[in-house]
Amino acid sequence: MLPPHLKERRFLVDRAAIRRYADLTHDYNPIHLDPAFAARTPMGGVIAHGMLSMSLIWQALAATFGPDAMAGLELDVRFAKPVREDTWVTAGGTRIGEEAKYEVWVRAEQNAGADTVIAGTVTLGRPDRRP
Amino acid sequence: MITFDDLQPGAALGQASFVFTQDLLDQWCALYPDDRAAGPHMPAAMVVMVMMRAYTEVMHDRPPGNIHAGQKFRIARLPALHEQVKTRLTCMGKELKRERRWVTFSMDTVDAADTLLFRGEMTTIWAA
């Protein structure tokens, strides 16, 4: 029986996390790291790598189903809004009907509320690969 | 610098190798401690490390200020510790829409037997 909700995961996106993520992925795009450059872009300032926050969706999935349940999994998300430095983000998801599919999201505690910054779906793998 | 005009849909752009080591796992888990539970296999979230390292290596001369707009992943199997994998990067398509330059790349990561491990599709707004 699949649970109705994913176990949520929370994370602080700060300058140190952004820098560490850049070093891990080799993604040194200045829009994430250079305040002077980022201020001149349409974003108006530094934004975090989208996948820094998206990684929490994987962790919510692993926390819910276990790390062995990833085979056959399909994830499809869009990055709806940027995440600024020093922002707490939370990832979670809700099952869609009776399907082995979840609506997933990452919400950021910014703009005096909980902004949905990443939204999409996750489809689980074959039933014999699920817990 | 690689501009929007240079990118050709369907073009194979290159490939990069990656070895999943204990040191890289430790570095990853320093940022995401929960992922320690995945051992001895790669945590699923680490596929972004494989993919982005391949992307930044192959597309090293990209313009500053690109924006990541969307992402898809399909996982068949995750690498085991010490396994070497290879990621092939292809330009899937591009489109000029509301004065924004949209580019989608596919990244197929395969094992030593050339069997697909995972596939990523990354949509970006290209800066130049």
Image (cartoon, rainbow, N blue to C red):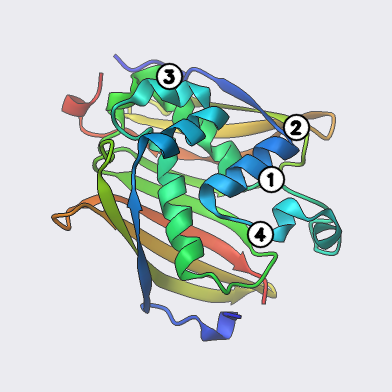
Q: Where is residue B5 in the image (x, y as percent from the top left)?
A: 56, 85
Rendered image: mark on residue A48 = 1
4 and 2 marks in contact (CB < 8 Å)? no
In the foreground, B94 or A33: A33
- Mark 4: secondary structure: loop
Sequence order check: which comes first, mark 2 or mark 3?
3
Alpha carbon distance from label 3 to label 1: 24 Å
3 and 1 marks in contact (CB < 8 Å)? no
Amino acid of disc 2: Thr
For disc 3, the marked residue is: A63
4 and 3 marks in contact (CB < 8 Å)? no
Mark 4 against mark 3, which lies toward the viewer? 4
Alpha carbon distance from label 1 to label 4: 10 Å
Residue found 41% across the figure and 50% down from its top = B50
Share a chain, discs 4 and 2? yes
For disc 4, the marked residue is: A29
Say which quarter of the image contains residue B41.
top left
* Horizontal relation, residue B17 to residue B3: left or right: left
Q: Which residue lies furthest to the front in this view?
A: B23
Q: Which residue lies furthest to the bottom in this view?
A: B5
Does residue B77 sit above or below B33 in this rendering?
Answer: below
Share a chain, discs 3 and 1? yes
Does residue B127 sit above or below A24 in this rendering?
Answer: below
Amino acid of disc 4: Asn
Question: Mark 3: few, some, or many residues within 10 Å (few <14, many ≥20)?
Answer: some
Rendered image: mark on residue A87 = 2
Rendered image: mark on residue B38 = none
- Mark 1: secondary structure: loop
- Mark 3: secondary structure: helix
Residue found 59% across the figure and 56% down from its top = B68
Question: Mark 1: few, some, or many residues within 10 Å (few <14, many ≥20)?
Answer: many
